[in-house]
Image: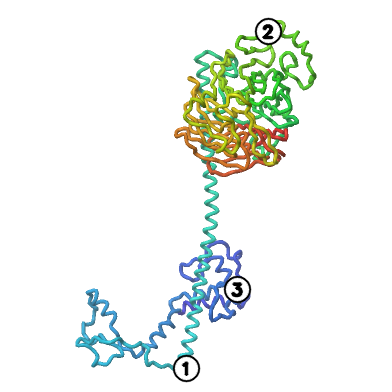
Amino acid sequence: MSHAATISSRPRAAVTSKQHVDFATLGRAPMRLGLGSRRVTSHELGIVEAASELLSAPIPDDPVETSAPSLLRGFQATIPSADKSRTRRRQTRSVDTPHLGLKKRTAGARGMMIEGSEDSEDDFVAVGVPDKERGRKGRRKRGRESLAANKTFGRDELDRQIREIRRDKENLHVRRSLVNSEIDEISQKIAALDVIRSRLEDDLLKLQEDELELDDELEMVKEQLNIEESRTRRGISASSMPAHMQSSRRRKGPAFLPSEHDDLPPGVAFMTLEAGMTPVTALDFSEPYGTLVTATQDEPQPRVWDLLSGEEIGRLRGHTGIVKAVQVEDHICLTGSEDGSVRMWDLRRVDEDEWDRGLVHLDDVVEEDESQAESESVVIEKPNGIRNGVISEGGERGGQCVRVLEGHSKAVTALYFEEDTLVTGASDKTIRQWDLTTGQCVMTMDLLWALSHSSVLAPSSESGTFPLPGATAAAGTFAVPTPPYADGSWELYQDYIGSCQFWGYALVSGSGDGAVRMWDMRTGQTHRTLLGHTGPVTSLQFDEIHIVSGSLDRSIRIWDLRSGGIFETIKYDHGVTSLQFDSRKVVSAAGENGVKIYNRTSMQHSTLLTNGHTRPIEKLRYMDRYLVSGGRDSMVKIWAL
């Protein structure tokens, strides 16, 4: 106990001299204050500072676990001598009791012998039982009395036991407080570890996204290598190869971005373009900081922009109806209009100030005299109704409108081209395949014929959210009301073919009856119909494994191409009008002012709003971390993702 006395004298001396020992003075190194191998924590050092207040505080009869004990008090309550008073009381209450021989009985039951003793019946004594009531072997026949029976103590002894019992209760309170303090400390450590774990999980997700990005980049490099090998085999140089025969970057990604993009703040629209006075109907761009083409509801002439400077270069003149579909690849642009035609443009000639070439320049925006235009140019008609460009008086082809494709009887609402193949979808419920090198329509796929020969019925108006047209109605105009946007506005949706895309011979289309159809472009027939949407399909995209489709039924569905089932469903509060996805994310316009982003790795949702649109977004397009969106506020925003 001399060691305990030495320890107990140290805190009291520190308290008497009022020398507080703070944690900054002692430093962050682990300390050992003569307590064996026990590690002293900063919490216990704080207890040392308040030792005088803790020692002077009264201990209630029923202590409440509200205050932490002092280091000295905790030490005194946990040493083995703290239980000596309890042992003394037990021995005092049974001081006249003969030895029971329990140790020997236990050893005998185990077949063991106690050294220095013999097995004798005299060692087994029954307490409180007369000899005449014992059995032949000395065992009692009745239950024994209590060990403390007929035992009396003096007042001094009883007072002493009361004090000891209270001190034992105090020791239990101290031990309980120490255990609770350790539990709190462990809980704080667990909370800190949870924060570290969450941060590490975020880092792991970021590494997974970086790996997917590298995979996409590797695929793009391989594709460029294949193109270069194909050029070498054909003997075609890169400069002489037509742009529409070069590779499309829509399925592959990401593009190699300029270094300036890394300096932009993420999630912020850093550029704003005024596209007109009405909502944006279509847009696409060639590359980050490249050429952008936009179309609005009030102008049949799409605008051409320089994304590096943010200036409008000019307008594409030729369509007589609203342009509803645009695709830009390098310097080639294809547009589909309500006039039923598709036009191919050479964007390299966009700044040429020549009216007879179909371009309206910003410096010369005036009305053209139709009679003068007819006298200056001659249009050569082909038997199949395809106009092969505009021919000047000298017989030399000129102008940025390279080709006009005519064949649809109603508005062209979707188009997609790669290399020399173009696919268009129109409100006449047909999909046409074109050869861009010859300008010929090589195949027509009729959705009404596919419906009549399909064993799978399209969703009816009773099961859908919107009134869908009859599947067998050959006549009539398709028109359904859109669900209200976030600002309460709505309009009639009339694009029966909302989107289409092909890859090799596989073609996928989304239509107004809510179905996603897969076609074989070699035969022109459907081989699978994916049902699930209850509203018109407005947009879609697919890769090797999944099809992602957006609909006015307020959802995006991810389909598994291997099974044909729905892999995942993303629900929103408003209709989806545009989307694009890659292996890491799904970016969409879902009837709100912000751009919706769904992280496919972490399954988290986010919205881009900073410096964004003031009305719901209609169309969007992105490459890697460079995104362009067009809204109902007639504005085009350029974002850094």
Using the image, determine if residue 601 lies above or below residue 401: below
Provide the secondary structure element on which disc 1 rests. Answer: helix
- Amino acid on which disc 1 is placed: Arg
> Where is residue 436, by image quadrant?
top right
Q: Which residue bears the numbered disc 3? A: 50
Residues under numbered marks 3 and 2 in contact, where contact means CB atoms less than 8 Å apart: no
Which residue is tagged 1?
155
Which quarter of the figure has residue 97? Answer: bottom left
Horizontally, residue 32 falls left or right of residue 270, namely left
Q: Could you say which is closer to the camera, residue 6 or residue 78?
A: 78
Left or right: 609 as drawn, with respect to 38:
right
Of callouts 2 and 1, the N-terminal one? 1
Disc 2 residue type (three-letter): Glu
In this figure, which residue is indicated by the disc labeled 2? Answer: 396
Q: Nearer the viewer, mark 2 or mark 1?
A: 2
Picture residue at 67% right of the left edge, 41% below the top: 486
